[in-house]
Image: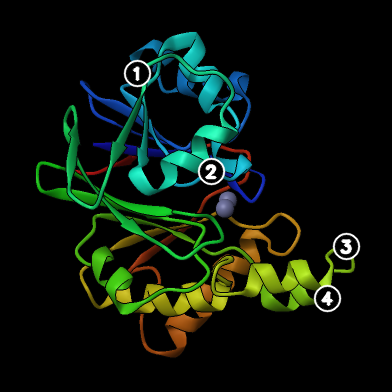
Amino acid sequence: MRFCSLASSSKGNVSVVYTDNTKILIDAGVSLAEIIAKLDALSIKPEQLDGILITHEHGDHIRSVGALNRKYGTRIYCHIDAYASLITKLNKIRPNSIFTFSNTAFAIGDFRIESFKIPHDVPCCCGFNIYNNARKITFATDLGCISEDIISRFYDSKLVVLESNHDEAMLMSNPKYSLSLKQRIKGDQGHLSNVVASKVVSRLAVNNVKQVILAHLSEENNTPSLCYKTVCDYLTAIGINPETNIKIYVAQAHDMSPIFHIV
Ligand SMILES: [Zn+2]
Ligand SMILES: [Zn+2]
């Protein structure tokens, strides 16, 4: 299976996971034109999509979900606990095109998918383990804090996509953000900081994870280089080599990531 981040930031998120036979998006939070152009760069046509996995209902994740559904009939997969609120945020969609899942695994084509709930300020936000031939990719962005149970779901993953949203000092000194917004972002239902992401990555490095993509960076309160440096410095300080023990990538807000081949 292959993974590519098409866009990743607090302003818009979409990723694609695909094999020759099955192609799914995780979220669709940028314009339809951008999604189509970036899928085209991967030789994927929107008609080929087998579905969109929805993490949660915020606009930076669902902006083009309705448009993809209306234009191409793309199926929408969301957690049963997210359905009622999500449906109010999507414009008209085709009948019978939302599929709900619960906490048990389900299949889309070549993939077996497990969801797990992560803490965020919506009725239901999900992370995912996506399996193909017993290998898994883990995806978890938009989480205000992280528990042992959530971390354990990342172990043995061939690729972990993890939020590293903000530098706390940049956030707290940002004059454009109100105190209440800063508290929302920092809170247990908000977003993970670079420091917390560093601690999570250090746990993954000793639990059979070899590569991590740091994702969903704030364009206002973080930079890719600061995020990368914070995580690498933390790992190095505790004796983990960020080149050889665990490879760190940073997803860009607007540019596509490399294609990660999971074999
Ligand atoms: Zn988001
Ligand atoms: Zn969100």
Separation of disc 2 and disc 4 at Cα? 28 Å
Q: Quadrant of the N terminus?
A: top left
Separation of disc 4 and disc 3 at Cα? 9 Å
Nearer the observer, 221 or 242: 221
Nearer the observer, 19 or 179: 179
Relative image position of residue 4 (x, y in whole percent): 41, 38
* Quadrant in which residue 228 is drawn: bottom right
* Quadrant in which residue 18 is drawn: top left
* N-term-proximal mark, 1 vs 3: 1
* N-term-proximal mark, 4 vs 1: 1
For mark 1, give the secondary structure: loop
Outermost front residue = 84
Label 1 sits on residue: 96
Q: Amino acid at mark 2?
A: Glu
Q: Are the residues at dot 4 and dot 3 in contact (C-beta closer than 8 Å)? A: no
Q: Are the residues at dot 1 and dot 2 in contact (C-beta closer than 8 Å)? A: no
Q: Residues within 10 Å of mark 1 (few under 14, many from 20)?
A: few
Q: Nearer the viewer, mark 1 or mark 2?
A: 1
Q: Amino acid at mark 4?
A: Ser
For mark 3, give the secondary structure: loop
Cβ of mark 4 under 8 A from ligand 1:
no
* N-term-proximal mark, 2 vs 4: 2
Label 4 sits on residue: 173
Q: Amino acid at mark 3?
A: Lys
260 up-or-down from 188: above or below: above
Cβ of mark 1 under 8 A from ligand 2:
no
Nearer the observer, 9 or 72: 72
Q: Nearer the viewer, mark 4 or mark 1?
A: 1
